[in-house]
Amino acid sequence: MKYRMCVLPGDGIGPEIVAQAVRVLDRVGEVFGHGFECATQLIGGAAIDATGGPLPEETLVAAKASDAVLLGAVGGPKWDAMDKAVRPEKGLLGIRKELGLFANLRPARLFDVLKNACCLRPDIVGQGLDVMVVRELTGGAYFGQPRGEETRGGERVAFNTMIYSESEIRRIAKVGFETARKRSGKLCSVDKANVLDVSQLWREVVIDEARNHSDVELSHMYVDNAAMQLVRAPSQFDVIVTENLFGDILSDEAAVITGSIGMLPSASLGAGGPGLYEPIHGSAPDIAGKDLANPLATILSVAMMFTHSLDLPAEAAAVERAVAEVLGQGYRTGDIMSPGGALVGCSRMGELVAGAIRA
């Protein structure tokens, strides 16, 4: 089979980690007999420097014509002082919106060999950590209107609008229920219904949608309690579904307690068209170009791409096995290094994982 990929290295460590993911992608193609045609395009700060904007039309055209999009990271201090309307992050938000990617799947799983890197108590770690956060991606305070800054009473005020329609809530709830159905059948909907009107509607719609998924056990939790419970007893969670802002925060928290944010992939999906796959960490400009970055989150994002966009489950499993095998052999990048481990750089880690790919 032949597949068209749109590759967006982005900024900071993005080009380094994406290069290793493409190396693994090419190796999977060799082993399983697939062809992956990769079209590299600009996004974020690199796009601003080259074209003046964070999301060139050429990038959008290539993304929409692809079977899947692989993204590195965007942003950095070089562009922090720019007008908010054209900062690198606008490229990421823009491509999500243009591709209709309303569902962000962020798995947080602690590999057994990385238990020592987990910041939680050993007794909590021993209970296991394998959570899938399903985050709504195109609504809420990040996209709501009106938004902006103005002067009131002689001082500046800024405002954002958290807004959701019933249809937006229902479609992400369906993704949450369907995801839970494929796992252990437990879904926790996280909101702030004791304070926010938008959360009250969220809870009502999720409860209504639960009638269509009677085989899934539904629970509800306020976001502040959910943040506490993720570090107190993460094993109680299987799938969490929540709105954009809450999902951003909770999924990053879940990532950190697995040992390193450098280990966590993500998939952004819509009703049709290509999905977008990226590590959940940022561009880490302080280590860019030093061969220090951990490429495993990006490589595991390729595995998610095989699962959710290309319908290649055997290939996804091969990538996940290769990552586990290399970690089991003791190889570590700096962020997950532990006593007795073998320290390697970004390029060497990608090379090791690619070499461990087998059918």
Image: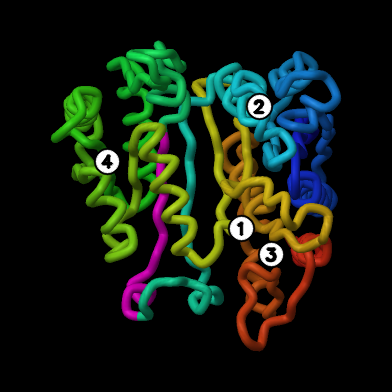
CA gap, disc 2 to disc 4? 30 Å
Nearer the camera: disc 3 or disc 2: 2
Seen in the image, is 13 located left or right of residue 141? right
The residue lying at 33 percent from left, 73 percent from top is 124
Which tag, 3 or 2, sits closer to the chain's start?
A: 2
Nearer the camera: disc 2 or disc 4: 2
Asked if residue 198 is positioned above or below residue 352 in the image, the reply reads: above
Asked if residue 220 is positioned above or below residue 196 in the image, the reply reads: below
Q: Amino acid at mark 3?
A: Ala
Which quadrant of the figure contains the C terminus?
bottom right
Front in this rendered view, residue 112 or 8: 8
Q: Amino acid at mark 1?
A: Gly
Seen in the image, is 221 located left or right of residue 57? left
**Residue 287 pos. (x, y %):** 75, 57
Front in this rendered view, residue 239 or 223: 223
Q: Which residue has dot 4 on it?
A: 190
Q: Which residue has dot 2 on it?
A: 87
**Residue 236 pos. (x, y %):** 27, 60
Which quadrant of the figure contains the N terminus?
top right
Q: Which residue has dot 3 on it?
A: 322
Seen in the image, is 149 located left or right of residue 43? left
Q: In the rendered structure, which segment of residues is drawn in magenta?
A: 123-135
- Residue 11: quarter of image: top right
Q: Amino acid at mark 2?
A: Arg
Q: Which residue has dot 1 on it?
A: 262
